[in-house]
Amino acid sequence: MNQTNASLAETFYATMREKNIGALEKYVHPNIELITPLGQQQGKAAYLEALKNFTAFFDKLTIRTKFAERDQALIVIDLECPAPIGKLPTASLMTFQDGLISRIEIFHDTAPFHKVKNDILA
């Protein structure tokens, strides 16, 4: 296991839990790519804006476990979000380049978001 990348992933998400966008910026590669079930972002400015919106969305972030191999780390978290989302188990596959996060691919169930969409349209 690549302890450096596992530690970086854990530190990044621990800082995210504190919702400190300024502190998170130093971990992000200029050409970061974000892939989620709900959309994609490319570049540091776009990612940081998405991150700012995301951190305003959840109430609590709990790190469950982390793994790393070569230039990647996988971290599993639980997000506590306002109703009707509730608890959202999430996995984040992170790729590192030059000690910075260059790619994040998020995996989570999108079904709770359909409820939000339906509530908005009702």
Image (cartoon, rainbow, N blue to C red):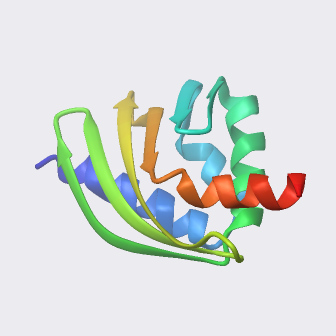
In the displayed structure, 15 sits above or below 40; it is below
Q: Is residue 2 left or right of residue 52?
A: left
Q: Indicate the position of residue 12 as horizontal and vertical percent values.
A: 49, 57
Q: Residue at x 39, y 36 (%)?
A: 99
Judged from this view, the residue extending furthest toward the front is 122
Q: Residue at x 34, y 61 (%)?
A: 76
Q: Nearer the viewer, residue 53 or 117?
A: 117
Q: Indicate the position of residue 5 as horizontal and vertical percent values.
A: 29, 47
Q: Nearer the viewer, residue 54 or 27?
A: 54
Res. 23 in view: no
Q: Indicate the position of residue 37 as horizontal and vertical percent values.
A: 53, 38
- Quarter of the C terminus within the rendering: bottom right
Q: Residue at x 73, y 64 (%)?
A: 57
In the displayed structure, 77 sits above or below 8; it is below
Judged from this view, the residue extending furthest toward the left is 1
Q: Residue at x 81, y 62 (%)?
A: 119
Residue 23 lies in quadrant: bottom right
In the displayed structure, 103 sits above or below 79; it is above
Q: Is residue 67 left or right of residue 99?
A: left
Residue 67 lies in quadrant: bottom left
Q: Total label count?
A: 0
Res. 47 in view: yes
Q: Indicate the position of residue 103 as horizontal and vertical percent values.
A: 46, 30
